[in-house]
Amino acid sequence: MDRLIQLLKENGRHSVEELSSELGIGADQIEKIISDLIDSGAILGFTAITDPSKIDDSDTVSALIEVKLTPERGGGFDRLARRIAKFDEVESCMLMSGGYDLCVVISGSSLHNVATFVAEKLSTLEGVVSTATHFQLKKYKSNGFLAELDGSGERLPVSP
Amino acid sequence: MSFNDKIADKVKEIPRSGIRDFFELVLGRDDVISLGVGEPDFSSPWHIREAAIYSLEKGETSYTSNLGMEKLRKAISASVQKQFNVNYDYRSEVLVTVGVSEALDLACRALLNPGDEVIYHEPCYVSYDPSISLAYGCPVSVPTRSENNFEVRAEEIEKKISPKSKILILNFPTNPTGAVMKQKELQDIADLCISKDLIVITDEIYSELVYEDDYNHVSISSLPEMKSRSILLHGFSKAYAMTGFRLGYSCAPAEITEAMMKIHQYSMLCAPITSQVAAIEALENGSKAVEKMRQDYRSRRDYMVSQFNDMGLPCHMPGGAFYAFPDIRGSGLSSKKFATDLLDTESVAAVPGDAFGGSGEGFLRCCYATDINLIKSAMKGFKRFVDSLK
C-alpha cells in the first residue's frame, strides 16, 4: 500500500495495469484499494502539475496570503480556516506556526481579481485580523517537480 | 610521416572496440531512441552534486593522499563491511581510483608478468580483454550461455586453467547480461581458486542493483579464505549515477594494495578531490536515492523483458545491473546486422552482443536505465521490426 501510494504520488497517470504488474497485485484489487483511498479521503484528488509560464493563460496570477485570525473558544482556528478553504479561489490553506496563522495560496485570472478577493471576501470576514499578500513571480519547483529539466542532456548515445 | 611504425605493437594488436563502431553509426542522428548506453539516465542525486559544489566553493582543489582521502577510505571500509561483510583496513587495504577502470588496470599491471594468463567470463565488459593485454597478460575467456542465465560454473573455468593461469576476473551482476551468481556456485569457484592458487579480481560495480527479493548478493571475497586472494573493485558510477565523477576503489590485501598504489602514484597521483568529496556524501547519505533508482530500474526491467518475450525474442530475466540481453538468433540475422537494420528502419539503437566478446553473438544489449516512455516507444519499434522479419 505504501508503495502504491508512492507510485501514484510520483505519477498519478499510472494505469491500473501498470500498477498491477509493478506490484504483483491483481488489477481488480488495485482498483479497489485506490477507490477505498479516495473514499476515505486519503487521496484527495489527481491533478496535472503545470508550469504557468509555458501555458497560454499565463495571465493567471498566484498569491500567497499571510492571514492573522482571532481564535475562537472551543474550535481555535478550525471553523474560520475551513470557511476560507471553501472559496474556489483558494488552492491551499494551511495553519502555520510563527508570525501569522493561516497561509492561503490563491490564484485568479488577473491581479485585480486576486486583489478584489482579498479585499472583499477575505479581509471582511469576522475574525480575520489582517492579511499580507505576496504575489508569485516565477515558479522553480512545484509539488516535487522542477520547472526546468535537470541535466542529462549530454549522455553519449552508445557507451560501454 | 607514417606513424604505423611508431605506434607500439601492443597497442596496434588491440582491435577497435565494437562499441565504438556502433557508436559512430548512431552519432550525428538526433532521432534515435538509444538503449545503447552503459550508464543511468538519472543525474547524480542533488545532495551529492551539492556537496561537490560546496567543496569547490570552499576552495578544496588540492591533491589528496595518494591512497585517497582518509575520510573517504574510512567510509568505504565501513560500506564494504556493511554490504559485503568483509573487513578492510582503510590505512593499508583501500585505494581510491579514477573509476573501476583504473583499478582494474592497476590490478592487472601490479600482478601480471608477460605471458601470465587471466581467465574471465564472457560476454563481458569491453575493457577486460584489452586491460589484460596492455598489462602483457594473456586473456582467456570462458563462454557463458543463456541456458545458464549467463552464470559461470567452476568446471568450465577449470577447463581453461593452465600452469600460467594467475588471475580470475568475475563481474556479477554482469555487464552486458545482468547475470547474478548464487552463493553455492560461487563457493565452488572459490574452492577452485584456492586449490589452483588463483587471485580473483571481483568487479562489484553493479552489486547494489539486484532486483529479486529473495536474492542476496554475495561477493566471492567474503567467502572463507578468499579475502587474502581477492581484489574487490567497486565504485560510484552505477548505483549512485555518478559516471562522470570517475570514482572507484579497490580493496585488497596490503601487499597488493601497495603494489597497485605504486603505479597509481606515478600515473594518476590521486583521484580528483571534488569527486572524492562527492563520494563521501554518497556513502553517508545516498542510500535512499539508490533504493529509489533501483525500484525504478526493476519496473523498467520487468516491462522490457516481458515485451521481448512476448514479441518472440527469448530473454532471460536478468537478476541485476540494468541490461536486458535478448536472444535474436531466431531472426537468422547476426547481432550486427540486426542492430544496424533496427537502427535504420526503426531508429532504435541497441548494442550488438558480439561487442562484448564472441559468445555474445546472437544477442543484443538493451539498457533499461532509460526513461520508461522511451523504452515503450523502443519496444514498439522492436516489435514492428521483428514482425517485419516473419
Image (tube, rainbow, N blue to C red):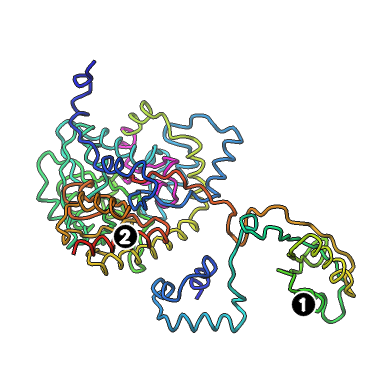
- Figure check: B269 above or below B231: above
Q: Which mark is residue B368?
A: none
How far across and down, in percent of the image, does residue B241 sit?
Answer: 44, 49
Q: Which residues are magenta?
A: B232-259
Residue at the disc numbered 1: A82
Quadrant where the C terminus of chain B lies? bottom left
How far across and down, in percent of the image, does residue B242 sit?
Answer: 44, 46
Residue at image point 35% right, 60% down? B210
- The chain ID associated with circle 2 is B
Mark 2 Cα within 10 Å, few/some/many (few <14, many 20+)? some
How far across and down, in percent of the image, does residue B385 sit?
Answer: 26, 60
Q: Is residue B251 left or right of residue A93?
A: left
Mark 1 Cα within 10 Å, few/some/many (few <14, many 20+)? few
Amino acid carrying label 2: it is Gly
- Figure check: B75 above or below B375: above
- Figure check: B204 above or below A30: above
